[in-house]
Amino acid sequence: MKVAIVGAGIVGTTAAHALLDEGHAVSLHDPRGIAGGTSRGNAGWIAHMDVLPLASPKAWRNVPRWLADPLGPLAIRPAYAARLAPWLLRFLLASTPGRVAASTRVLTALQLRALPAWTRRLGTLGLGSHLHEDGALSVWTSEAAFAAAGALLRYQAESGIPVERLDAAATRALEPALGPGIVGGALYPTGARVSDPRLFTEALGEAALGRGATLDTRAVQAIAPGPDGIALRLADGTALRADRVVLAAGAWSKTLAAGLGHRVPLDTERGYNVTLQRGRLGLARQTVFEGHGFVTTPLDTGDRVGGAVEFGGLEAAPNFARVDAILTRLQPFLPEADLTGGERWMGFRPSIPDSLPVIGPARDPRVVLAFGHGHYGLTQGAITAEIVAALVAGRTPPLDLSPFSPDRF
Ligand SMILES: Cc1cc2nc3c(=O)[nH]c(=O)nc-3n(C[C@H](O)[C@H](O)[C@H](O)COP(=O)(O)OP(=O)(O)OC[C@H]3O[C@@H](n4cnc5c(N)ncnc54)[C@H](O)[C@@H]3O)c2cc1C
C-alpha cells in the first residue's frame, strides 16, 4: 500500500522502517525535514525506568513551590493560562490514586517493551552503534525524598527493571564529580541513551530514504479520507493520495486530529537544555537530579543539561533564562564543573494530561494516530512503530491499545 507519514521526527522515521519491513511504499511529509522538531534536541534517554505518570498527588504537592519561582522547574506563561485551563483540569482528574495506579500499569507495560524494540530495530538496520547501554543514575538531595523513593525502587525491581539502591558514599564512588549535597542514588544498569538525538533521528531517516521511502517538505494542512483513499491536502492546493496515513506530527498533531473528528487534549510542555563541551560535567553516565527538574546526559556530541516544563504554546519565543537557572541549580551538585558557554535549545514535548500517548486507529481506520508521547517519545519510538505497522496490516498489536485510544478523554 501507499502509506504517508505526517511528521518525520523519531516516531515518524521509525514507523517508516516498520512499514517498509512489510513492503509498503512509504512517504514522509514534514516541512522541517527529518529531525526538525522535538526529536532534534532532547536529552537522549531511553528512559524505560520512568514508569510513573506525571499527573499525581506528589506533583500537585510540588506545584506551589515550583510556580513560586518564575524560573523554576514548572512555569505557566500568564498569557497562556486561560488556554491551558482545560488541559490542567484533565491533569488534575488524572491525579487521583486510582487513575495514577492505572496509568502506572499501562506506562510500565509500554516502557518495558521500549528498549527491546530499539534493540530489534537498530540491530536490523545496523545502527546499533547509536545506542549506549552505560546505565543511568538517579540522585537525591533530600533524605526524606530518598526514603520515600524506596517504594518506587521496589516497584521497578518487581516489574523487571534492574535497580540498585546506593548510599551517598557508593553514589559518589560511582560518580566522583558529585558534590557533598547528594544523600543517595539508584543505579539502573540497563539505562540507555542514544549517540545524539539529532544524529540518531537523521540516521534513521536517511536509512529509510535509502530503503526507498520518500520525503516531501511541504506542510500537510488536512488529512481527508475519501472513497478512493486518503487525501493529504497541502498549502499550495495540491492533494496527494495515499491508501493509509500515519499522523505522527508530535506537538503539532492537534489540528490535524481535529480535522479527523478527534478532540484530543494535546498541549505542549516546552523544555530547555544546553549542550556543553564533551566531558565538562565529569559524569560518566546519564543522571537525573530528583526533585530538581533537570537531567544530564553525556552525549557523543557534548554534555547536555536540561529539563523544565513551561506551558506557553507553540508560538511564544523561548526564554533561555530558564537554561541559566538550571545551571545555577546544578552547580552546587557538581562543584568542579565548568558550566559556561554551550548551545541552548528549546523543544515542544507533545503532552497529553494522563502521560500516555495517543496510539490507535482514527475514526476512519485507514488513518493511524501516533502522537502525544510527552517526555518519552524517544524511549517509545520503536515500540510505537511496531504497533503502527500492526495496525496498518490489520494485525493484533503487541499490547492492548484501549488506554491509548484517542477517544478516552
Ligand atoms: C527538553 C526535552 C528533553 C527530552 N528528553 C527526552 C528523553 O531523554 N527521552 C525521551 O524519550 N524523550 C525525551 N523528550 C521527549 C521527546 O523529545 C518527544 O516526545 C519526541 O521527540 C516526540 O517525537 P515525535 O516524532 O512525536 O515529534 P517531533 O520530533 O516533534 O516530530 C513531529 C514532526 O511533525 C512535523 N510537523 C508538524 N506539523 C506538520 C504538518 N502540518 N505537516 C507535516 N509535518 C508536520 C514537525 O515539523 C516535526 O518534525 C524530551 C523533550 C524535551 C523538550
Image (cartoon, helix red, strand yellow):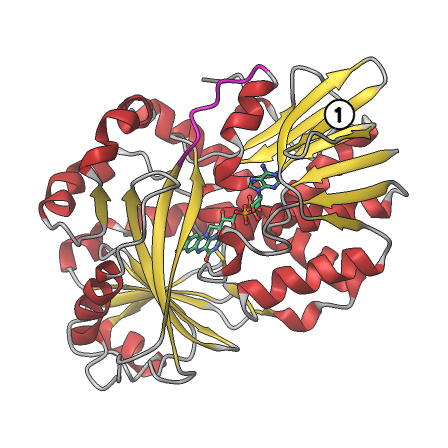
314 vs 407: above or below: below
Q: Can you give x and y, in whole percent of width and height, for residue 218 in the image? A: 66, 43
Q: Secondary structure at mark 1?
A: strand
Query: Which of these two is toward me, 252 or 100?
Result: 252
Q: Main secondary structure of the magenta part?
A: loop
| Residue annotated with mark 1 | 231
Left-right relation of 88 to 238: left
Q: Residues in magenta?
A: 261-267
Left-right relation of 274 to 381: left
Q: Can you give x and y, in whole percent of width and height, for residue 208 in the image? A: 78, 55
- The quarter of the picture where the C terminus appears is top left
Q: Residue at x 30, y 77 (%)?
A: 170
Answer whether residue 262 is magenta in the image. yes
Q: Residue at x 90, y 43 (%)?
A: 23
Q: Disc 1 marks which amino acid?
A: Ala
Dot 1, crowdedness within 10 Å: few (<14), some or many (≥20)? Answer: many
Q: Can you give x and y, in whole percent of width and height, for residue 340 in the image? A: 26, 80
User: Can residue 404 be spotted in the picture?
Assistant: no
133 vs 115: above or below: below
